[in-house]
């Protein structure tokens, strides 16, 4: 059986604040946020509110390097690779996540708030029902 790591809303709020402080230290600003549907929706909205960014693009085929890419977790790297291949200037892409899977090799353009404790499946407040359905 795979272990699980539940994340509370209070922890999410703290992680968003930590992540945004790192983003604000960058020598640039972002005109928008881009994300993938499902896991990236909620973190993108919270980061946008914190940073005062009004435009959020979801599931774009072409990603602008002037847009901050936000997701909930950097895990296998598959989402990162896909987004990187769709970016107009991959070297300028900033990929921001709440969690980064411990033990993975992180790309230099990844910002994250926290590493996972282990290989446990991270259950975010917005995907608890989806996770419960998957266990049936």
Image (cartoon, grey):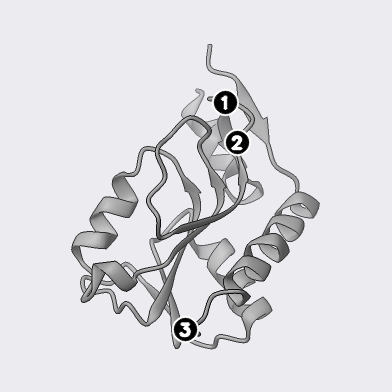
Residue 105 placement (x, y as % from top left)? 40, 38
In this view, 99 is above or below 118: below
Q: Where is residue 136 in the image (x, y as percent from the top left)?
A: 50, 23
Give the Cα distance between marks 3 and 1.
Answer: 32 Å
Give the x, y percent position of residue 76.
36, 38
Dot placed on the residue nearer the N-terminal end, 3 or 1 = 3
Residue neighbourhood size for the residue with mark 1, other residues' Cα within 10 Å, grouped as few (<14), some (14–19), many (≥20)? few
The kind of secondary structure element at disc 2 is loop
Q: Name the residue under label 3.
A: 30
| Contact (Cβ within 8 Å) of mark 2 with mark 1 | yes
The residue where tag 2 is placed is: 116
Q: How far apart are marks 2 and 3 (CA)?
A: 27 Å
Alpha carbon distance from label 2 to label 1: 8 Å
Residues under numbered marks 3 and 1 in contact, where contact means CB atoms less than 8 Å apart: no
- Provide residue 43's location: percent of width, then percent of height: 58, 62
Residue shown at the point (66%, 48%) measured from the top left: 125
Quarter holding residue 93: bottom left
The residue carrying mark 1 is: 120
Q: As drawn, which residue projects farthest toward the right?
A: 10
Tag 3: Cα neighbours inside 10 Å, few (<14), some, or many (≥20)? some
């Amino acid at each position: 059986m795979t272990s699980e790591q539940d994340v509370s809303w209070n922890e999410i709020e703290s992680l968003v604040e930590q992540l945004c402080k790192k983003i604000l230290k960058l020598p640039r600003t972002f005109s928008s946020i881009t994300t993938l549907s499902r896991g990236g929706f909620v973190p993108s909205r919270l980061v946008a509110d914190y940073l005062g960014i009004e435009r959020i693009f979801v599931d774009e085929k072409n990603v602008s390097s002037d847009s901050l890419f936000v997701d909930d977790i950097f895990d296998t790297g598959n989402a990162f690779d896909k987004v990187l291949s769709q970016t107009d200037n991959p070297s300028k892409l900033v990929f921001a996540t709440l969690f980064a899977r411990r033990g993975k090799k992180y790309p230099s353009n990844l910002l994250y708030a926290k590493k996972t404790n282990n290989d446990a499946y991270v259950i975010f407040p917005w995907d608890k029902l989806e996770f419960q359905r998957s266990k049936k």
